[in-house]
Image (tube, helix red, strand yellow):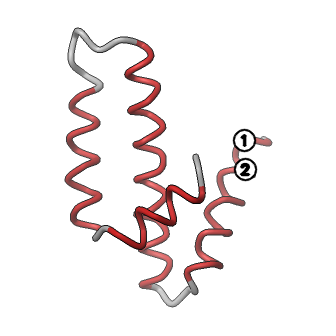
Amino acid sequence: MKIPVIRQLFQNTTPAQLEATLEVLEAFTEFRGVSDHEIDVAGEMITNICGALEVHQMVSDGAVEKDALNAFGQKVMGSIDR
């Protein structure tokens, strides 16, 4: 997860675009010939896309972009610490 990447995705793509990309990446990871490295890269991209989608949701619910990004980062870091 990289907050600058999530911010860039949030600012430059719509939720519909993110959802479509997410579907493609998820399908890609299920192909037989995909290497572990490629799956790791796709997984990182999926995480960032999901983060951007969550930030879009928080902003549409009334949060300020900066606060939504910080809240998402804290949520992820909190789940890692458990």
User: Which numbered dot is residue 71?
Assistant: none
Of 6 and 80, nearer the camera is: 6
The secondary element bearing badge 1 is classed as helix
Residue at mark 1: 80
Q: From the viewer's perspective, is residue 37 above or below residue 46?
A: above
Q: Residues within 10 Å of mark 1 (few under 14, many from 20)?
A: few
Q: From the viewer's perspective, is residue 61 above or below residue 21?
A: below
Residue at mark 2: 77
Which three-letter amino acid code belongs to the residue tagged 1?
Ile
Label 2 close to label 1 by CB (< 8 Å): yes
For the point 29% across and 58% down, the residue is 18
Q: Is residue 74 left or right of residue 36?
A: right
The image quarter in which residue 73 lies: bottom right
Q: Position of residue 62 (x, y in %)?
A: 51, 90
* The C terminus sits in image quarter: top right
How many angstroms separate mark 2 from mark 1 (CA)? 5 Å
For the point 59% across and 50% down, the residue is 2
Q: Position of residue 48 (x, y in %)?
A: 47, 50
Q: Is residue 22 left or right of residue 77?
A: left
Q: Is residue 31 left or right of residue 29?
A: left
The secondary element bearing badge 2 is classed as helix
Q: Residues within 10 Å of mark 2 (few under 14, many from 20)?
A: few
The image quarter in which residue 23 lies: top left
For the point 24% across and 49% down, the residue is 21
